[in-house]
Amino acid sequence: MAAKKQYKVLIVEDDPTYAEPLQEHIRQSDDFKVMAVTASVEHAIKLVKINLPDVVIIDLQLTEGDGLDLIHRLRDPDALLPIVPYLLVTTSFTSNLIRDRLSDGLADYIFKKQNNSYSPAAVLNHLRLMARHFHRNRKPDMSLDDETDKAERLRARIDSELSRYYMSTSSIARTLLVELIYRATLNPLLDLIAIGTLYTEVGKQFEKTPKNVDVSVSRLIDIAFAKTDPVDLARAYQPYLDIGRCSPTNKEFILYIVEKLRREGFV
């Protein structure tokens, strides 16, 4: 029997009190999966271009950009996006002007957060009802080839592996780490030196310096190893850490995950 399709959801939200319950509710479903959570408009645009979500849930009020601007950019025909995802907008307030603009073809659906009808379950139920419309904006000549599907499956597997550690899903550092590990899997002669060159590649992709990438990922790994339950950590990460070292280096961690995926036959 063929596996049931899981629609990919990108959540653009900077308030954990809304993002985390929604993310958890979607993750418990078998027909949707959370592709990523971000609070940044620019990061959201990159994720849409690279990962091709089926639907984007956008909060209008963001600290890292304007949600309305993001909606305009995702609907802009000159943006040359490979797919225009279904857009579900959430907001704590809307003026008549904004509501009229959103209703005039910009948003597919609007949920007002401070309303009795709003809940993570209601959002998920609405997505299920509207799933048949998700691909109506796909460009006619756009088809996802086997290589694209393989890349997405691998990124999803990497992300699920990182979920075994205390790593914030809304953190840009986690997205950087997923991309570092993904690119590392593409090198059959991977070693610690080769991993170092990936900082430049990933930095260019996300408009960060190699140093920014290195520091962000290092901090993420340090926090993960400090906060993950010791029993869970022992199951997830097998190499022995010398006394005095509370976490592996970035390169050691990336190399370990890549080797683990290879042992599984995933790459």
Image (cartoon, helix red, strand yellow):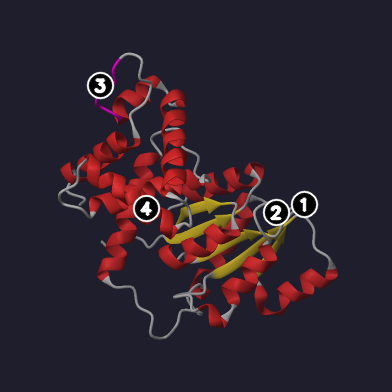
The residue located at (42%, 63%) in the rendering is 51
Residue 39 coordinates in the image, percent (x, y): 60, 52
Label 3 – label 1 distance at C-alpha = 49 Å
Front: mark 2 or 3: 3
Quadrant position of residue 78: bottom right
| Closer-to-camera residue (14/187) | 187
Front: mark 4 or 2: 4
| Circle nearer the N terminus (4, 1) | 1
* Residue 160 seen from this side: yes
Q: Main secondary structure of the magenta part?
A: loop
Label 3 – label 4 distance at C-alpha = 29 Å
Residue 183 coordinates in the image, percent (x, y): 29, 53
The residue at which mark 4 appears reads as 200
The three-letter amino acid code for the residue at tag 4 is Thr
* Residue 28 seen from this side: no
Query: In what quadrant of the picture does the N terminus appear?
Result: bottom left
The residue located at (26%, 69%) in the rendering is 146
The residue located at (64%, 53%) in the rendering is 64
Q: Determine crowd level at label 4: few under 14, some 14-19, many 20+ residues with C-alpha closer than 10 A.
A: some
The residue at which mark 3 appears reads as 240
The three-letter amino acid code for the residue at tag 2 is Tyr
Whether the residues at callouts 2 and 1 have beta carbons within 8 Å, the answer is yes
Q: Determine crowd level at label 3: few under 14, some 14-19, many 20+ residues with C-alpha closer than 10 A.
A: few
Q: Determine crowd level at label 1: few under 14, some 14-19, many 20+ residues with C-alpha closer than 10 A.
A: few
Q: Please tell me whether residue 95 is drawn above or below residue 92 in the rendered image.
A: below
The three-letter amino acid code for the residue at tag 1 is Gln
The residue at which mark 1 appears reads as 114
The three-letter amino acid code for the residue at tag 3 is Tyr
Helix, strand or loop for disc 3: loop
Helix, strand or loop for disc 4: helix
**First to last magenta residue range:** 237-242
The residue at which mark 2 appears reads as 118
